[in-house]
């Protein structure tokens, strides 16, 4: 299976003034594209060639894992950003309030976790194995789907995500991240996961380009009775 670089879900300059077109040209057009191209070259002629991205992440290590996980993480990251302001759905807002005290307290905790991550990596809002909201950080290419956690929102804190616009000031990038955070995407995943927990009700998943669909497929597969 040939993996492809997804189109950005908005224009290249749509995230300005918070993230410039130049940042997206490099981040999407060079870094993200590089991971996809590396992955395709690495898996050619191997046991991983016909596997889905998620299957490769679960079954590989080393360079193949790194490039597969970075491909997934970036696929997800672009959908975690929105050119227009969004707010959490009422069910997600209630869960955030219950877990973190308030949306503002959540943002502060998330930002501190992202700023405090040593080196390169990612800061996530996930539903953990206990179906609870949790802020986690992952180093380098690591990703919550390794552990069957469901990502809702991510911030890429590799320097290539912000260096053109903010130089080394990761805190300034985090401050502006909240103007871009795509709560519609996070809320849709949260709603799907809620549906998934109700027996007999399948979640809507109609967009084959949305990495969420692959996550849901994985979760559904796990729930199938063994034969
Ligand atoms: Fe990145």
Image: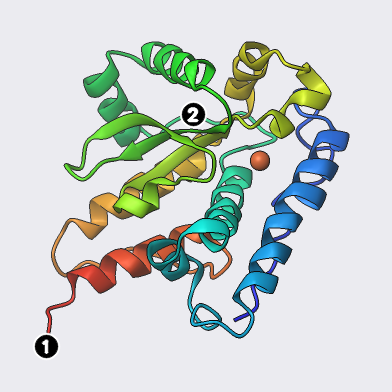
Question: Is 200 left, or right, of 36 in this rendering?
Answer: left
Q: Residue furthest front?
A: 62
| Depicted 35 relative to depicted 207: above or below | above
Q: CA distance from mark 2 to mark 1?
A: 43 Å
Which residue lies at the image location 69% right of the left edge and 69% below the top edge?
Answer: 4
Q: At which x and y percent is residue 41?
A: 70, 72
Q: Quadrant of the N terminus?
A: bottom right
Q: At which x and y percent is residue 111?
A: 49, 17
Observer-nearest of 81 and 93:
81
Q: Quadrant of the C terminus?
A: bottom left
Tell me which label, 2 or 1, sits earlier in the chain. 2
Which residue carries the number 1 mark?
227
Question: Is 108 left, or right, of 22 in this rendering?
Answer: left
Observer-nearest of 50 and 18:
50
Q: At which x and y percent is residue 97?
A: 28, 20
**Res 78 label:** none
Ligand 1, seen in the image, is in the quarter at top right
Q: Secondary structure at mark 2?
A: loop
Q: Are marks 2 and 1 in contact (CB under 8 Å)?
A: no
Q: At which x and y percent is residue 23?
A: 81, 35
Which residue carries the number 2 mark?
87
| Depicted 47 relative to depicted 78: above or below | below
Which residue lies at the image location 25% right of the left edge and 56% below the top edge?
Answer: 195
Question: Is 94 left, or right, of 34 in this rendering?
Answer: left
Which residue lies at the image location 28% right of the left edge and 64% below the top edge?
Answer: 219
Q: Residues within 10 Å of mark 1 (few under 14, many from 20)?
A: few
Observer-nearest of 30 and 43:
43
Q: Nearer the viewer, mark 2 or mark 1?
A: 1
Quadrant of residue 163 in the image?
top right
């Amino acid at each position: 299976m040939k993996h492809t670089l997804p189109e950005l879900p908005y224009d290249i300059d749509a995230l300005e003034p918070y993230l410039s077109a130049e940042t997206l040209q490099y981040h999407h057009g060079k870094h993200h594209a590089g991971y996809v191209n590396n992955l395709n070259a690495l898996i050619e002629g191997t046991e991983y060639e016909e596997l889905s991205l998620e299957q490769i992440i679960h079954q590989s290590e080393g360079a193949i894992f790194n490039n597969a996980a970075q491909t997934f993480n970036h696929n997800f990251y672009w959908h975690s950003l929105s050119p227009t302001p969004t707010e959490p759905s009422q069910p997600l807002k209630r869960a955030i309030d219950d877990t973190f005290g308030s949306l503002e307290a959540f943002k502060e905790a998330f930002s501190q976790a992202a700023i405090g991550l040593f080196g390169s990596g990612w800061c996530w809002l996930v539903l953990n194995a206990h179906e609870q909201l949790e802020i986690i950080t992952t180093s380098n290419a690591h990703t919550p789907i390794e552990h069957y956690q469901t990502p809702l929102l991510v911030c890429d804190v590799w320097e290539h995500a912000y260096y053109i616009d903010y130089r080394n000031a990761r805190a300034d990038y985090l401050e502006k991240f909240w103007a871009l955070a795509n709560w519609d995407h996070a809320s849709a995943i949260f709603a799907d996961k809620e549906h998934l927990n109700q027996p007999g009700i399948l979640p809507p998943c109609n967009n084959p380009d949305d990495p969420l669909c692959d996550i849901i497929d994985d979760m559904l597969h796990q729930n199938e009775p063994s034969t």
